[in-house]
Amino acid sequence: MPRRVPNEVIVELQKRAENVRNVSIVAHVDHGKTTLADALISSNGIISSRSVTDQMRYLDSREDEQLRGITMKSSVISLHHKNTAGDHLVNLIDSPGHIDFSSEVSTAVRLSDGCLVVVDVVEGVCPQTKAVLRQAWLERLKPVLVLNKIDRLILEKKFTMLEAYHRLNQVLEQANAAVALLFSAEDNWTTGIGVIDDSKIYFAPESGNVVFGAAFHTWGFTIDYFADIYAKKLGARKNVLKRALWGDYYINMKQKKIVKGALEKGKDPAFCTYILKYFYEIYNLVADKNKEKCMAFAQQLKIKIYPREEKAIMTSPDSFLTSLLGQWLPISNAALKLVCFISKMIAVPKKELPQNRRGPLSMEEIRARRAAAEEAAAKASAVESNEIVEVKRSDSEEESHVFIAIGRVFSGKISKGDRIHGLGAKHRVGESTFSEEITIGELYLVMGKDLLSIDVAPAGALVGIGGIKEASTMIINTGTLSSTLRCPSFAPVYMEAVPILRVAVEPEDLMEMEKLREGLKLLNVADPCVEIMDTATGELVLGACGEVHLEKCLDDLETRDVKSPHDFHLTSGKRSAPIVPFRETLIEAPKVDELGESFGQQQEEIDQASGSVTLYTINRQARIKVQAFPLPSSVRLFLETRSEDLRSIILGKASLEFNDEIRSSLMDVFHKAGFAKSSATVDQIIAFGPEGFGPNILLNMVEINIKSLDQQLISGFQVAANSGPMMEEPMAGVGFRLLEWEIIQEDNFDITLTSGQLMSTVKEACRKSFSILHKRLLAAMYTCEIQASCEVLGKVYGVIGKRDGKILEEDMVEGTDLFNIKAALPVIESFGFADEIRKKTSGLASPQLRFSHWSEVEGDPWWVPTTEEEIQHYGEKADYESTAKKYMNLIRKRKGLWIEQKTVEHAEKQRTITKNK
């Protein structure tokens, strides 16, 4: 086992910026990121190589991470690496692979220089692999591909060497295809076709950006290693051999020539003959438990095998393979090359800070502590019980965790006590707005779950900064620290997943509500993808990316991030059922409002043919006519995808050129959707809704003669668009035309009285105009991607069909019995889906769920049978409940709205129609 590098050496290496290397590990879930991290950590003697085989998961320091076996929070550790160029400091970051925690990957790659992309060669490039490649591409990182778990091809799949070579080549092509899509997606019309050189962006073993290995057995190599060996043996040039050792080449040893076309001539490629055969030989020897030949193989490689490891050939083959191959080809030598940085805050127990950590006590300190303890015990026996309660309460109010901001120094240096500026995301160069002056507290070198105090961090260093949360209100999830206001702040990070799943929380004791609010604030600081909402009804709503992310957030809220975990407990009885958003389109207006009050005070005229509604204000001083119409799906999608651009235009933050660009794009969308006068339609838009930039529009077809009432008309539209009458959910894909506007009694017109009534009347007119058109629900949908073997394919389909899912694609992974399944699944049906899939398939399939789109739910939720055939088929009251009606009743019941449902209190006491005799 390598000797552990002293902390003093790590601190000294950090001062040499040119020798600091940061590397992050990104991959699909269960492809071996954390195992690779353990293998790299073992090279520094922090853990033994045997711990890697035992799956220690050193950087998974959270209890729920160890329990679930997945990484949930990115972790950082500094490692020493020595090569021909000298000593280097490698800051290693292990990031999550589950889609629910993709925000952790986003913050990790935000300031990265490079990353290791790990791929399981059996499963190949999976959805999350493509996602992390996209995140790395957006941050302009140069990735290195790690083809991991090659041992599975030999031991599990029983591939021949040629089949293994073809499989490795297929995975390499899959990764390059994903990179090619990212490259082609960037349209650059200023450069001629064929001028851009894209040869440097792809993965190629001869270029030195591909690592082959098995992190579980701590071995890995690049083509360079074997090119060096064979260049000396054959007397050939290394660069020529690098190209020959990967590809359709073989080496003619008699003529000492490299010949192309190995497969055509029925020969094994050089990669099989001169590289892969060694691993097949040793794995087969260990599988056969051939002790003599295993030891002969080790002697041939001049590797020292201890007696305990020699015995492991018979009892623990993995330990022997780790010892042999890990000494011959340590994966740390092949992988520790790139740099990366993470910018986020993590919760650290206060007692684990270096200044609070217990050190060795002198005899004087021991005697003093013993005397103090005896004195405290004597006092404690004499105090009243109420005084004891007060002491306990004051102790419990102390913070159990502090927050450490992880940051990278780009230029200059940062020291304890420095006064610098904290810049928010909206900071503008040279201005003092959205900035504040803060004092740097403690500085730490992060070593996994341990922290090492330092005084100064130079450029290029990865450093933990204490006191940021307490000192700054501008920096919440990420931010920029600078000694000058002339520094631009970093752009917001790209989030692969969005918080679509919500739950309302409240404490056991309502007196603890403020502590809950504080806990939610801290949770928002610790997790960049958490969404916290304080609704108008007083509910505190927590938004998460998925079911696993939600459970992790609730666990943090209970045990980690609240100030006093001893006093505050969030139990399952105080969590609402998960809140799933819906959208309403073209719904039926109720006969009464939600308070049960009739609309009889208003005179209304409904034109069934045109879909228009005319309403009067209650004081009958104004009359308006509104018509609803459905927006084409292309227009709705445009308004949804460009909502942030529309928001910047409405708030006056966009340039005139950008304003014209959005206007022309919107005109083009309307024209393609079939609007005859697209230009006039865009000019008539006076509002988007809800919230001023949503997927609904209000068109003004008349000239309003009282400009002071413009805002009342728009406000009424916004209220209606934000809360539809069917489930009080926002509307989407609906347009309104203001057809007529009239003041009836101009002489007695009271603008102060009418303005409020006008807003209410516009709201009701919009809602009623929906009722005479067809009505549908839009459900939030997940894209579900599953990789499963053919044996459990039917069970996977059964679970998806049971939950109203729809299969979109099914592809077989070449060379394996695995299938990649892509399906659409309603978010409301996703609870417990992952657990059910794992149970039905005995753990052979695991889904990845990502929010993708809104989908129309088939059927009118208010439909009742009318024709004779419908009544005969469904019954007079349509006892069959459609999917749309089921969803509608679930949401209405959660919100306390009226639903048409009969409640049976005592089933055994129901009346029977019988004649007493």
Image (cartoon, rainbow, N blue to C red):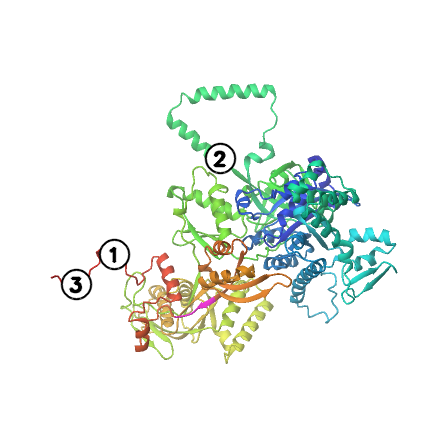
Instruction: Please give the label number shown on residue 398.
Output: 2
**In whole angstroms, how far apart are the C-alphas of marks 1 and 3?**
17 Å
Label drawn at residue 907: 1
Disc 2 or 1, which lies upstream in sequence? 2
Q: Earlier in the sequence, mark 2 or mark 3?
A: 2
Q: Helix or strand or loop: what does disc 3 sit on?
A: loop
**Taking the image as drawn, is residue 410 in sight?**
no
Q: Is residue 857 magenta?
A: yes
> Which one is nearer the viewer's eye here, 32 or 798?
798
Residue at numbered disc 3: 914
Q: Amino acid at mark 2?
A: Glu
Magenta-span inclusion, residue 747:
no
**Real-space Cα distance between discs 2 and 1?**
54 Å
Secondary structure at badge 2 equals loop
Identified by mark 1, the residue type is Ala
- Camera-side residue: 349 or 859? 859
Q: Nearer the viewer, mark 2 or mark 3?
A: 3
How far from the left and from the top, in percent, is residue 465?
61, 41
Q: Are marks 1 and 3 in contact (CB under 8 Å)?
A: no
Residue 182: horizontal and vertical position, in percent? 65, 63
Closer to the observer: label 1 or label 3? 3
Residue furthest to the left in view is 917
**Mark 1 vs 3, N-terminal side:** 1
Of the 4 image quadrants, the one containing the C terminus is: bottom left
